[in-house]
Image (cartoon, helix red, strand yellow):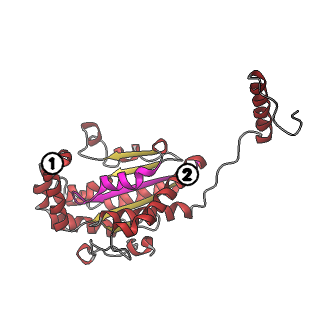
Amino acid sequence: MNYSEKFRVKPGGTVRLDKIDAAFKGKHEDQASALGEIERYTQRLRELQYLLYAEGSRSLLIILQAMDAGGKDGTINHVLGNMNPQGVNVFGFKVPSAEEAAHDFLWRIHQAAPHRGQVAIFNRSHYEDVLVSRVHNLVPKKVWSKRYDLINDFEKNLVDNGTHILKFYLHISKSEQLRRFKQRIDDPARHWKISASDYSEREYWDDYAKAFEAALSKCSTAHAPWFVIPANHKWFRNLAVSQIVVETLESLKMEFPKPTVDIKEIRQKYHLAEQEEDAKNGKKPKGKNRK
């Protein structure tokens, strides 16, 4: 199944999250049956990220958004964590610092945009400024309503400068969120994830759903698409996200850059050095003329 096409929000379309099954799991019945496919994609992802790094001419920006407990950290850990850390940066955007708040809302985001050859992963992003700001009336509607166009222009500028953008909304149901909150309460290793706002923000579920629907509908473009990923099943989330990232990177037709040195000359120097090392250690010469 082509998840890129199935879950992509078509430009100009209208998203209704209540019409999308958060428990969808495709052809697989459970994690065990999907594991082999997930492993193939995550291994291929590592290979492609190495090629992106080596090529050094383009970059990839992956944006993760979700309701609380939607699985952003898990996606980074289980899918995107397979990439080489040398070429990946992860940014978590929370409440702006005093310095960040003194600039326009996109200022801190631009600082984190990926360099050529790099992958940047945003755990939350500039979309918080049309989500939290809208739900909690942090700024007037006349302010946040203009931000959709500003976001689209900002992302187009990144794309025009060689950055490929993939945006994932990890879609869980309200009941699944409550189940995950209980896991955090019951598991001491997850207590650190509990925040005072977990249940208070849950009261705004419908408001957040409307805010997400607006952002997904207004800001899914051909150059920076949104994907609504059914995420009640963590293993299916991992499968869908890894497939979409892999297919996007493969579509770039990347190639290793040509060597900047004469490989033949370097090989000759290597063989000479190897012979000198063998002679130093009393080894017989290698090759046809060895006696």
Would residue 2 appear left or right of 131 to someone viewing this image? right
Q: Amino acid at mark 1?
A: Ser
- In the image, the segment drawn in magenta is 56-83
At 17% from the left edge and 50% from the top edge, which residue is drawn? Answer: 187
Q: Position of residue 17 (x, y in %)?
A: 25, 72
At 76% from the left edge and 27% from the top edge, which residue is drawn? Answer: 278
- Is 57 in the magenta? yes
Q: Position of residue 248 (x, y in %)?
A: 50, 63
The vertical placement of 96 against 152, above or below, is above
The vertical placement of 177 against 275, above or below, is below
Q: How many marks?
A: 2
Provide the secondary structure element on which disc 2 rests: helix
Separation of marks 1 and 2 at Cα, in angstroms: 37 Å
The residue carrying mark 2 is: 52
* Image quarter (top left, top right, bottom left or bottom right) of the C terminus: top right
The vertical placement of 19 against 200, above or below, is below
Residue nearer the viewer, 53 or 212:
53
Q: Is residue 161 visible?
A: no
Q: Amino acid at mark 2?
A: Leu
